[in-house]
Structure formats: structure tokens, C-alpha cells
């Protein structure tokens, strides 16, 4: 018995020295979260073990009783330190205010007041000496001692509840820390059960609580327990808009934030394999399989149900550069992609603006040039007026093309006559020997400048792509058509003698010609920007026509005229 107690005493002394050294080391790192609390805990445990060891070595003497009371000098800061450490571990160190510290000092003050001025037996009733007891004296606890014991276990219970809860919710990312914390907090409870129900001649609680201090020290200094406490980690990860999945080396999801669960529409994905969890999202699963650990970080972009995601897979390594898992991050970039597409669309519109501007200004420039030549030759004031009209038309076209580039809808609607629109547009185009025929008339409500642009482009398209031989005797010709004389400076039309026919319908109008027409397989794409059947064409004329029609809320299609030429049908007008 004596030999066992001596060995136990020296073991306590060795542990006390280790705990004291760790306490000094922790105090030097008190700027870290939880560092001060750990230093106080370790210092208290060191004093506890030191007094217990001294009491065993002096057992049976009055000095042993003094060391028995000295144990409480270590017990009290140890319990307070454990409670403070639990608050720091669970990110509740904001509660460690001066008020909390003051409350923690109340019990020690009451205890030591009872020790020094209280009645005999308030803390201990002592009889003996006896060889059966660890300190050589029969020591029976009094009411103050039992109150202290209840208070101490209350602090341990609260600390245990806080630590165990947050250790469990921290997930697999903190597996080693979790195991260390659970072991540390379980040791004092195991010692208490063993002391109460076991038949031991020595008190195991100080030694087992020393194990708690040593385990927490390892977790703090080597496992970096409080670098990112579980609750702090969760606050950071859960606040991310990106979906975050932590995957172990067996491709099992060990952690996922709320954004990740919402993305997969699954609340219980932790514990599932990546294959099972991403089964409902084949695009994500395919990209996950394609990513690898060859690079420090891999990245890809996927499209899923009109949504875009930036996918990243980052390997996780421990201090020995061993792969321990991966972070699979999915960030939605739909808005960014939409902005990029809108920017591309705007850039295309700017390109179209330049092309349309040069395209539609060509006719009034040609007319102005021809009229100016005639004016100089004939000295006719009316020709100067027509030059001025051409310049005004160019100014109007610039405004219209700007609206086209901005994709603006027409708002300036007025009532117009179909025949008047056709004749006005005819006057703005260098038609050469072409002929205009108007059959039927009706009112049209729309933007005059845009509708002029529509007619001008159709007429010019018919003249440039019309029949080279012409069919003056065809079904679309008439003797009362209107034609414009060709001037010396006018553009030579690609086709001569083409007849253009404008006709009113119940819900719109048509513009046809007796040229070669458009093959059926090309009629749908003829309105596409850049599509043209002529090597010198720009492919803009009918694209502009379609834009004007759509801006008015109408419909347009290309068909075949009675003479086999092209026929533009505009429908959907208000009747």
C-alpha cells in the first residue's frame, strides 16, 4: 500500500511539472482565443496535483492536512478555467466579462471564509491518523465541502454540455479535435464514477483531470483546436452564398452548408457519397468526376436548367502533406453570365449600328448627290429643295438607327396612309428604271420614320436583287406606275425594269416584285442579320425590316408573288 502511494505521489509530481510548464507556455499565447482560459486551467490542475502529491508524501502528519486544504487552491481555478475554455471553444467568450469573472470568484471567497473563520467541521471533520486513508487521516466532508463539490460538478457539467454539443455539430472536418475533446471531457466523469462505485485507496480525480488538461493542450497546440472553433467555422461557411461540400478521401460528404443543401434540395446529404448526393444534378456530377487533384485547385463552369455555376475542387492536406479530403465549391454565376451576354449583345448592336448607318444612308446620299448634280446643271431651285429633303432624311435615319442600336421600341405613333408611305419611301431611294404600283390603300398607325425605313429597305432590296431583264408585261406590272428618271450620278441598279407592287390587306399590307424571288428554304433566315444572296450586299435590309415590324408588334414573312418574285407580307395591324 505504502509503495503504491509513493509511486502515485511521484506520478502526480511529474504530471504537475508538465502541467505547470504547459500553463506557462499557454500563458505566453494568451492572445490566441482560449489561451488565457487554458493557462488558468492548467495552472489550477498543476497546483491540485502538486498539493495532492505532497499530501501523500507527508501522510499521517499535520502537514498532510495542510496540503489537503491546499488542494482547493488548485481545484477552484481549474474548474473556472475549464468553464472559460468551454465558452471560448464554443465561441461564447463574449460572455467572459468582468461580471462573469466576479461571479466565478464568489464561491472561492465563501469557501475560504468558511475555512478560516467558520466553525469546525464546516469543510472537514478529521479523525485518525489511519493507514487506510490516502493522506493518513480519516477525512469526512462537511456541508461547505459538499456545496463546493456540487458547484464544481455543475461547472464541469455545463462545460461538458457546451463542448460536446459543438464538438458533435462541427462535422468530420474537425474529427481529430472532436475525438480529443470528447476524451478530455469524459475523463473526469469516469474518475468520479470510479471513485464513487469502485473500491480504490487513492483518489483518481486529480490524475484524470490532469489527463483532461493534457488532452486539451494537445488539441490546442497541435490540433489547433481554437484557430477556427466549430461555431466560428459554421458562421463563416453558412454565411457564404456558394454551396460548400467537404468530401473525404472516400468521396463521402462529411460537411455541407445550407446553400449546398438548398442547391441539391436535400437536407440529409451529410454522410452520403458524392455519387448519390449529386444524382439529381447530372451536370454537377459529371464535372465533379472530371476534376482531379493534379493541380492545387481545379475549376469549371457548367450550365444547368438556364443557370450557370462556377465549380471548384480544392484538395485538403494535413501537416504531413497527406490528402485528407476535398472542398467542393459551387458558386452560381447566372447573373454574371447574363451581364456578359448582355454586353455581347450590346457590342453586336454597336456593330450593327455602324453597318446599318452606312447601309441606310447610302440611298439619301445617292439621291442628294444626283439632285445636286442636276441642280448645278439646270440651276433649278426645286432640285436644291430635294437635296435638302435628302439631308433631312439622313438626319432622321441617324436618329432611327440609334434607336435600332439601342433596341428601343417605337413610341411615336401617328395615322398614315399606305400609299403615301410607299411614295415617300420611293422618293428616297435611287430606283433607276424600276416601277412602283400601288393597288389598294389603308390607314396604318405607327412611327412614320421607322415605316419609311421599312419601305425604303424593301424597295432598295427589290431594285438591287430584282430581275435583270424585267417583266414589264407580268402580272405585277401596270401602266400607271410611277418611276423616277435616272440621273447621271445615280447608282446603276442591279436589276432594270423590276416592278414593285404595294397592296393593302385586311390586317396589313404586302410588298411584292417580279424579280427572281427567294427560294423557300431560305425564306426564314433571310431576315437574319448578315444574310444576303448578293456578293456586294450587306445582309442588313431585311433585318432592319424585321426589327421595325417587331417594334410595332406586327408579324412579317417572306413568300412568293404571283409572278414568282419575292413578296413581303406584314400582318397583325389594327383593323
Image (cartoon, rainbow, N blue to C red):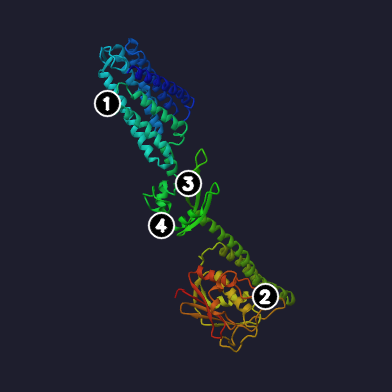
User: In terms of sequence position, does the residue under pointer 3 or pointer 1 come before the other?
Assistant: 1
User: In terms of sequence position, does the residue under pointer 2 or pointer 3 come before the other?
Assistant: 3
Kindly report the distance in space between the C-alpha atoms of the residues bearing marks 4 and 1. Answer: 55 Å
Which residue is at 35% across, 37% downward? 165
Would residue 413 be seen by someone viewing this image from the given angle?
A: no
Q: Nearer the viewer, mark 4 or mark 1?
A: 1
Identify residue for label 3.
327
Q: Nearer the viewer, mark 2 or mark 3?
A: 3
Identify residue for label 2.
382
Query: 218 or 268, which lies in front?
Result: 218
- Find numbered disc 2 in the image and state the secondary structure of the residue it sits on: helix
* Labels 3 & 4 near each other (Cβ < 8 A): no
| Mark 1 crowdedness (10 Å alpha carbons): few <14, some 14-19, many ≥20 | few
Q: Residue 280 carries which label?
A: 4
* Labels 4 & 1 near each other (Cβ < 8 A): no
Picture quarter containing residue 117?
top left
- Find numbered disc 4 in the image and state the secondary structure of the residue it sits on: loop
Identify residue for label 1.
196
User: In terms of sequence position, does the residue under pointer 2 or pointer 1 come before the other?
Assistant: 1
Location of the N terminus by quadrant is: top left
Amino acid at each position: 500500500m505504502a509503495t503504491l502511494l509513493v509511486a502515485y505521489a511521484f506520478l502526480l509530481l511529474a504530471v504537475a511539472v508538465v502541467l505547470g510548464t504547459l500553463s506557462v507556455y499557454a500563458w505566453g499565447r494568451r492572445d490566441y482565443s482560449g489561451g488565457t482560459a487554458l493557462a488558468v486551467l492548467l495552472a489550477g490542475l498543476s497546483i491540485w496535483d502538486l498539493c495532492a502529491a505532497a499530501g501523500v508524501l507527508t501522510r499521517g502528519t499535520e502537514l498532510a492536512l495542510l496540503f489537503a486544504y491546499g488542494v482547493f487552491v488548485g481545484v477552484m481555478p481549474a474548474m473556472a478555467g475549464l468553464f472559460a475554455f468551454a465558452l471560448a471553444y464554443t465561441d461564447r467568450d463574449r460572455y467572459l466579462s468582468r461580471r462573469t469573472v466576479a461571479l466565478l470568484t464568489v464561491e472561492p471567497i465563501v469557501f475560504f471564509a468558511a475555512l478560516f473563520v467558520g466553525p469546525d467541521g464546516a469543510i472537514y471533520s478529521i479523525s485518525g491518523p489511519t493507514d487506510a486513508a490516502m493522506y493518513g487521516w480519516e477525512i469526512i466532508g462537511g456541508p461547505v465541502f459538499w456545496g463546493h463539490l456540487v458547484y464544481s460538478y455543475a461547472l464541469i457539467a455545463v462545460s461538458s454540455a457546451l463542448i460536446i454539443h459543438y464538438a458533435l455539430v462541427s462535422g468530420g472536418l474537425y474529427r481529430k479535435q472532436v475525438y480529443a475533446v470528447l476524451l478530455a471531457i469524459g475523463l473526469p466523469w469516469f474518475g468520479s464514477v470510479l471513485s464513487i462505485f469502485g473500491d480504490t485507496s487513492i483518489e483518481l480525480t486529480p490524475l484524470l483531470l490532469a489527463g483532461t488538461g493534457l488532452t486539451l493542450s494537445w488539441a490546442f497546440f497541435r490540433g489547433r483546436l481554437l484557430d477556427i472553433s466549430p461555431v466560428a467555422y459554421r458562421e463563416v461557411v453558412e454565411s457564404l452564398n456558394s454551396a460548400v461540400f467537404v468530401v473525404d478521401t472516400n468521396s463521402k460528404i462529411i460537411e455541407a452548408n445550407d446553400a449546398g443543401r438548398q442547391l441539391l434540395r436535400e437536407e440529409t446529404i451529410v454522410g452520403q457519397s458524392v455519387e448519390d448526393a449529386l444524382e439529381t444534378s447530372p451536370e454537377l456530377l459529371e464535372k465533379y468526376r472530371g476534376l482531379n487533384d493534379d493541380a492545387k485547385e481545379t475549376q469549371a463552369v457548367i450550365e444547368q436548367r438556364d443557370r450557370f455555376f462556377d465549380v471548384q475542387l480544392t484538395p485538403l492536406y494535413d501537416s504531413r502533406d497527406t490528402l485528407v479530403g476535398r472542398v467542393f465549391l459551387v458558386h452560381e454565376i447566372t447573373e454574371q453570365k447574363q451581364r456578359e451576354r448582355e454586353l455581347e449583345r450590346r457590342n453586336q448592336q454597336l456593330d450593327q449600328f455602324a453597318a446599318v448607318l452606312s447601309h441606310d444612308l447610302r440611298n439619301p446620299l445617292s439621291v442628294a448627290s444626283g439632285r445636286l448634280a442636276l441642280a448645278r446643271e439646270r440651276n433649278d431651285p426645286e432640285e436644291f429643295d430635294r437635296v435638302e429633303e435628302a439631308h433631312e432624311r439622313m438626319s432622321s435615319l441617324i436618329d432611327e438607327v440609334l434607336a435600332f442600336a439601342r433596341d428601343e421600341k417605337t413610341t411615336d405613333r401617328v395615322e398614315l396612309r399606305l400609299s403615301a408611305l410607299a411614295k415617300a419611301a420611293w422618293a428616297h431611294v435611287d430606283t433607276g428604271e424600276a416601277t412602283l404600283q400601288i393597288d389598294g390603300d389603308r390607314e396604318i398607325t405607327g412611327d412614320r420614320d421607322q415605316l419609311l425605313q421599312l419601305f425604303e429597305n424593301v424597295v432598295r432590296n427589290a431594285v438591287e436583287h430584282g430581275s435583270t431583264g424585267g417583266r414589264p408585261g407580268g402580272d405585277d406590272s401596270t401602266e400607271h406606275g410611277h418611276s423616277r428618271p435616272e440621273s447621271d450620278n445615280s447608282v446603276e441598279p442591279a436589276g432594270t425594269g423590276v416592278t414593285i407592287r404595294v397592296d393593302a390587306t385586311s390586317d396589313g399590307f404586302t410588298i411584292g416584285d417580279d424579280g427572281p424571288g427567294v427560294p423557300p428554304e431560305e425564306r426564314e433566315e433571310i431576315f437574319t442579320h448578315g444574310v444576303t444572296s448578293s456578293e456586294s450586299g450587306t445582309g442588313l435590309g431585311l433585318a432592319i425590316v424585321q426589327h421595325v415590324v417587331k417594334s410595332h408588334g406586327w408579324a412579317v414573312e417572306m413568300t412568293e408573288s404571283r409572278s414568282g418574285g419575292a413578296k413581303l407580307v406584314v400582318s397583325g395591324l389594327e383593323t
